[in-house]
Image: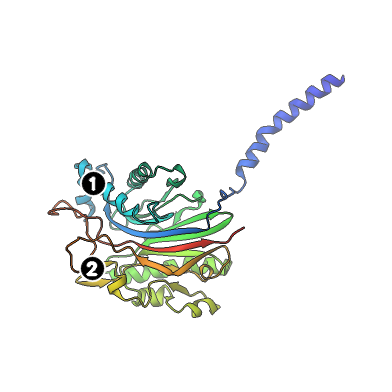
Amino acid sequence: MSRRGLSSLLLLLLLSFLPLAQGCQSAAAPKSAPTTQTEFLFCHWNVENFFDDKNDGRAGQGDKEYDGFFADNPDLLKLKLAKLTEAILKMNDGKGPDILALVEVETQRAGELLQKALNDKLTDPALHYQNLLMKEVSVGRHIAPAILTRLSVVKDRTRTLDKQHRILVAHLKVNDHELIVIASHWTSRLKETGKKGRTDYADKIYGAANAMFKSNPGVDLLVSGDFNDDPDDESVAKHLHASGDREAVRSSASLKLFNLFAGKDTKGFGTLYYKQWHIFDQLVVSPGLLDNKGWSCEPASAQVFNELHRAKDKQKRPWRFGGATEKGERGYSDHFPVMVRLHIEKN
């Protein structure tokens, strides 16, 4: 064979292997987008019956009212989105949280509507919420947790723990440091099985967290949610193993979790008012978030964003948006958001 013929044959062989090489490259684990940012704001918020613009014919208690509420009243949906967007962009110096965990979201579509509403207000594309993580569930009601973030995520690892609980597990990855977020919405106190249901939620989340801890004691895990219980209630303190004793959490050989809202006065940290103040919305972290490796949190920064109340309300309770029977001007939600500052180790 001539030298020219040999060169042509080698070129053909190279071209035939090129698709295989490209396939191998695409199958490799995704690298997180590098960033020089080292501080991030995490926020959890129960956004109160946030349904989309489609009528799905839902007939369940609670869902029936809200399924058609926004679908049949586009002006009210526009107002709900405006209220949520206004509140969210009051946080973090007008940028909104870097990671926003939401509960009481009907569908992926509802999450996308909020994502677009926020991005339309954020003039800097670098601040846009690039990722929406959600898995729809019907557990009594068709509402679920969702996460909006402008940070890099490992999207194919997003999952629910099972079909019986509103528990979303998400993996974020920045500068190759992984943060796992468990966003949850526990059983309501209005149900007869509520107490047992809430301990079930706590057991389920602790079981998942414990498995992660055994695999990696330094795992950076943040559990957020509307627990429908206070920090000192049995479901949180005993079943979730979450307390305000930082040293006990850090020194324990078995997994204990640190509750950023344990021991707080409800007058300053109340997130819901029903006959009295409650701290139902909480942030709980693993020991890994209390060190200076990978991700870490700043416990002293944990706070309630309690500005979302009526100007003349002496109790300064959350100003709810309400449903079809709501009279007068509408507010935001029947819960206040809760926030904490997170840090990431410099590479």
Q: Quadrant of residue 87?
A: bottom left
Helix, strand or loop status at disc 1:
helix
Number of residues whose C-alpha sits closer than 10 Å to that of mark 2, classed few (under 14), some (14–19) or many (20 or more): some
Residue 80 coordinates in the image, percent (x, y): 25, 49
Q: Is residue 23 left or right of residue 51?
A: right
- Residue at screen point 16% across, 63% down: 312
Does 271 sit above or below residue 22?
below
- Residue 79, labelled with which disc? 1
Residue 214 coordinates in the image, percent (x, y): 56, 69
Q: Is residue 208 visible?
A: yes
- Residue at screen point 27% across, 73% down: 267
Residue 271 coordinates in the image, percent (x, y): 29, 67
For the rendered model, the colour scheme is rainbow
Q: How far is the residue under mark 2 from the one under mark 1?
A: 23 Å
Q: Nearer the viewer, residue 227 or 247?
A: 247
Does 304 sit above or below residue 159?
below
Q: Residue furthest front?
A: 93
Q: Quadrant of residue 93?
A: bottom left
Residue 295 coordinates in the image, percent (x, y): 53, 62
The amino acid marked with disc number 2 is Tyr
Does 294 sit above or below residue 136?
below
Helix, strand or loop status at disc 2:
strand
The amino acid marked with disc number 1 is Leu
Q: Nearer the viewer, residue 216 or 98?
A: 98
Sequence-earlier tag: 2 or 1: 1
Does 346 sit above or below residue 57?
below
Q: Is residue 161 visible?
A: no
Number of residues whose C-alpha sits closer than 10 Å to that of mark 1, classed few (under 14), some (14–19) or many (20 or more): some
Q: Which residue is mark 2?
A: 273
